[in-house]
Image (spheres, rainbow, N blue to C red):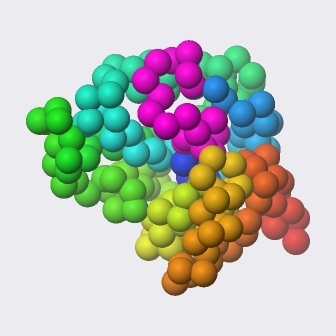
Amino acid sequence: MNKAVFLDRDGTINEEMGYINHISRFKIFDYFFPALKILKDLGYKVIIITNQSGIARGYFSESLVKEIHSSLKLEAQNKGTEIDGIYYCPHHKDGIIEKYSIECTCRKPKPGLILKAKQEHDINFSESFMIGDRYKDMEFAFKNGLKTIMVMTGYGIGEYTYQKNTWPQLPDYICENILQAAETISNLKLR
């Protein structure tokens, strides 16, 4: 079985800009690719799990999401590293696009996407991590037995500062950004 690091997308690997409705608005953090390289060098599969309800809401098309993800994977390859998979949920129960306006099992914190990734990549959750900027990313990880790292980019700093006292369980690690999260995982492996 393989170990993996699951990543949230918006606010974790790229700037949180609300709904990214044009590829020009997809701004990758400078430190994402160095973080990706660290994780890959440690032998982890790196898999992005993201909710993209803007598709269901009619804010942008599914083809835009696919274009952004293809561009992201190509840029990783051009920098000498790779993303092993990108899984996204296009649904929202209140959406206006009928085929996506459903109560699904893949919208985080529900487990549909991560279970699909686990099966397709033969992942051992007990050796795996989730890195994200929202508590729903942490809930998603807790429910699936992953170690958790919350980053203070995107919504992270606000959620952590103002909501942590309401959380039933705290993340295992708090990091400034995804690069520090990758370094934390590296340091844990050196122990």
Q: Determine if the magenta segment contains residue 16.
A: yes
Q: Is residue 119 visible?
A: no
Q: Residue at x 70, y 17 (%)?
A: 78
Residue 146 point in image, percent of width and height: 56, 68
How many numbered discs, if any?
Answer: 0
Q: Is residue 87 left or right of residue 53?
A: right
Q: Residue at x 59, y 19 (%)?
A: 74
Looking at the rendering, the stretch of residues picked out in magenta corresponds to: 9-26
Magenta-colored segment: predominant secondary structure: loop
Q: Is residue 63 visible?
A: yes
Q: Nearer the viewer, residue 166 or 184?
A: 166
Residue 36 point in image, percent of width and height: 71, 40
Q: Residue at x 77, y 31 (%)?
A: 30
Q: Nearer the viewer, residue 126 or 23?
A: 23
From this view, report whether residue 164 is shown above or below residue 50: below
Q: Nearer the viewer, residue 134 or 113?
A: 134
Residue 46 point in image, percent of width and height: 60, 45
Q: Is residue 98 left or right of residue 27?
A: left
Residue found farthest to the front: 162
Q: Is residue 98 left or right of residue 87?
A: left
Q: Residue at x 16, y 48 (%)?
A: 102
Question: Dividing the image into 4 quarters, which one contains the N terminus?
Answer: bottom right
Residue found farthest to the left: 98
Q: Determine if the magenta segment contains residue 47.
A: no
From this view, report whether residue 171 is shown above or below residue 76: below
Question: Dividing the image into 4 quarters, which one contains the C terminus?
Answer: bottom right
